[in-house]
Amino acid sequence: MTSPSRRQDPAQAWDANVYATNARFVADLAGAVVDLLAPQAGERILDLGCGDGALTQKIAAQGADVLGVDASDDLIRAARALGLNAEVANGHQLAFDQEFDAVFSNAALHWMPDPDAVIEGVRRALKPGGRFIAEFGGLGNVAKIIAAIDEELTGRGHPGLAGHPWYFPSPQEYAERLQTHGFVVEQIGLIDRPTRLPGDVGGWLDTFADAFLRVLDPGARREARDKIVDLLGARIRDADGVWWADYVRLRFRAVLAS
Ligand code: BEZ
C-alpha cells in the first residue's frame, strides 16, 4: 500500500521486509474488494498502490493481465521478485491513456492527499466503460491510534497529528469527487473493520507512523513509541490480550460511461 501517495510520502520509509512482517493482514483482508473487482481472464488491470504485489499476484492468478504501480522502489522490487509486471509511479501523476479495463486499489488511496489528481489519472487510464474498484481508509479510520500518537506528541510539545497526512473521506465526499470526474458510482460505503494485529500495536507504529516520531530525538522516540503502545493497550487490546486496529474502510465500485 502509500506527499503524494501510499508509499509516496518521502517521510514515510517503506521496507518490504517490515511490511511483510507487520502488514501482511492488509492483503489477507482484501478478499471482498477483489471479489468486487471480479477480474476476468484477459482483462488489462492496473493495481494502483500495489505494494509488494500480494494482491497483484492474486488478480493475475485469475487470468488478468495486471500492471502494479507503487511509489516505493523497495516494494516494487519485492513485487517484481514475484515475477509480476510492476513499476514505480506516482499515483497523482498516472500517465496512462485509455489502456485498462479496470483500475483496482487496496489500502493505498488514503496515502494520496490530492484525490482529484488521482481520480483524474484513473479516468484517463481507463478505457470507455472501464471500472474503478477500491478500498481504503474512510472517515474515522484509526481514530484511536491517531488520538494516542497525538496525545503523546503534544504532551512533548510537538504539534501532534492534527494535520496527519492520511486522507480518510466520507462516502458522500468521495462519491461526489468520482461523479465530478465522470464516474457513475454503483456502490460506495463505510465498513467498520476492527483488524486483528499480528502482535502489539508497536509493529503497526513502526511500519506506518515512524515518520511522525522522527520529530523526536532517537532516545525520546523509543520512549514515546512505548508510551503510545501503553496508552493504546487500554483502548484497543481485548481481554485476551489481542490488539485490534480500529480500521474503517471505504469501499466502492464506479464505472465510466462507455
Ligand atoms: C490503513 O490501511 O487504514 C492505514 C494504514 C497505515 C496508516 C494509516 C491507515
Image: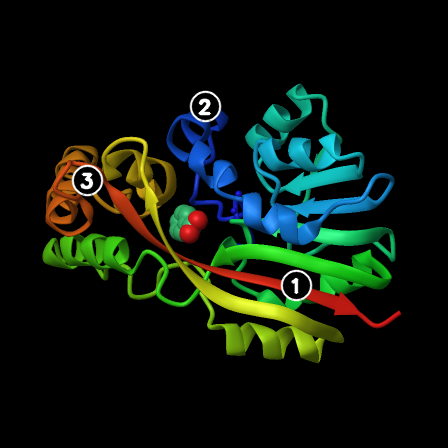
Task: Compute the Cα span from label 2 to label 3.
Answer: 20 Å
Q: Which of marks 2 and 3 is nearer the N terminus?
A: 2
Residue 225: give its label: 3
Observer able to see residue 92: no
Q: What residue type is labelled 3?
A: Arg
Observer able to see residue 182: yes
Q: What residue type is labelled 2?
A: Asn
Report if the CB atoms under discs 3 and 1 are less than 8 Å apart: no
Using the image, determine if residue 59 lies above or below residue 36.
Answer: above
Q: What residue type is labelled 1?
A: Arg
Residue found at x 15% / y 36%: 241
The residue beneath circle 1 is 253
Nearer to the camera, 129 or 67: 129
Q: Nearer the viewer, mark 2 or mark 1?
A: 1
Report if the CB atoms under discs 2 and 3 are less than 8 Å apart: no
**Picture quarter containing residue 55?**
top right
Nearer to the camera, 35 or 59: 35
Left or right of 160? Residue 163 is right
Residue found at x 15% / y 33%: 219
Residue 17: give its label: 2
> In the rendering, at what x and y percent does residue 95 appear?
79, 53
Using the image, determine if residue 16 lies above or below residue 114.
Answer: above
> In the rendering, at what x and y percent does residue 147 appear?
22, 59
Task: Compute the Cα span from label 2 to label 1.
Answer: 31 Å
**Picture quarter containing residue 166?**
bottom left
